[in-house]
Amino acid sequence: MAADLGKVSILARREIEARLAAPLMEALTREMGAQRAREVLGEVVCSLARQAGQDLARALGGNSLVHLAQGLELWTQEDALDLLILSQSENELCYDVRRCRYAEMYQELGLGELGLVLSCQRDFAFIEGFNPEVILTRRGTILEGQSYCDFRYRLKGTQDQEGQDPGTCQDADHG
């Protein structure tokens, strides 16, 4: 009998994964070196993320950026993210994460670097699975030392109202 993961928040899932992945990474590092171990873990996480993207699109009944915006509630459960939506349309979804309990959890566990692989880097593979016609651009994350994470999703081949290329959504003032 399979567990209903929908009853477990993504924040809780990421903590469980981190607690399993940390000793696994240590063992893999001893066997194959740090770089190769990180590559292997990254490949596995990206594969899982692509599948999760496909699963979410199926669950939401579509893979548009409007659907993706509806799915944000999954990541924000338990106040896991403080989001500032900058723009939202059929062609783009742009937001900043001003507080990230995922990053805080990884830091508290002493696993900031691992958190980059388990959470931050999976975002790109996730959107490939959700909709391969959507591009995600991001300049940085809280786990990388930035004050916020910027998420800029745009349909391939579209431009914003000012004719700018994807990834140039208006930035918020975080001062």
Image (tube, rainbow, N blue to C red):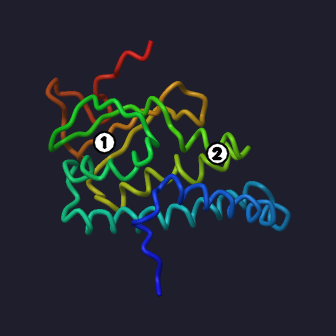
Q: Quick check: 141 left or right of 168?
A: right
Q: Quadrant of residue 36?
A: bottom right
Assign a secondary structure to mark 1. strand
Q: Quadrant of residue 53?
A: bottom left
Residue 126 position in % (x across, y down): 41, 57
For this orientation, the residue located farthest to the right is 30
Q: Quick check: 157 left or right of 43?
A: left
Q: Quick check: 163 left or right of 48?
A: left
Q: Earlier in the sequence, mark 2 or mark 1?
A: 2
For this orientation, the residue located farthest to the top is 175
Q: Residue at x 51, y 33 (%)?
A: 140
Residue at numbered disc 1: 153
Q: Residue at x 52, y 46 (%)?
A: 120
- How many callouts does the rendering have? 2
Q: Residue at x 42, y 64 (%)?
A: 50
Compared to residue 74, the image places residue 8 above or below, namely below
Q: Quadrant of residue 152?
A: top left
* Measured Cα–Cα span from mark 2 to mark 1: 25 Å
Residue 172 position in % (x across, y down): 34, 20
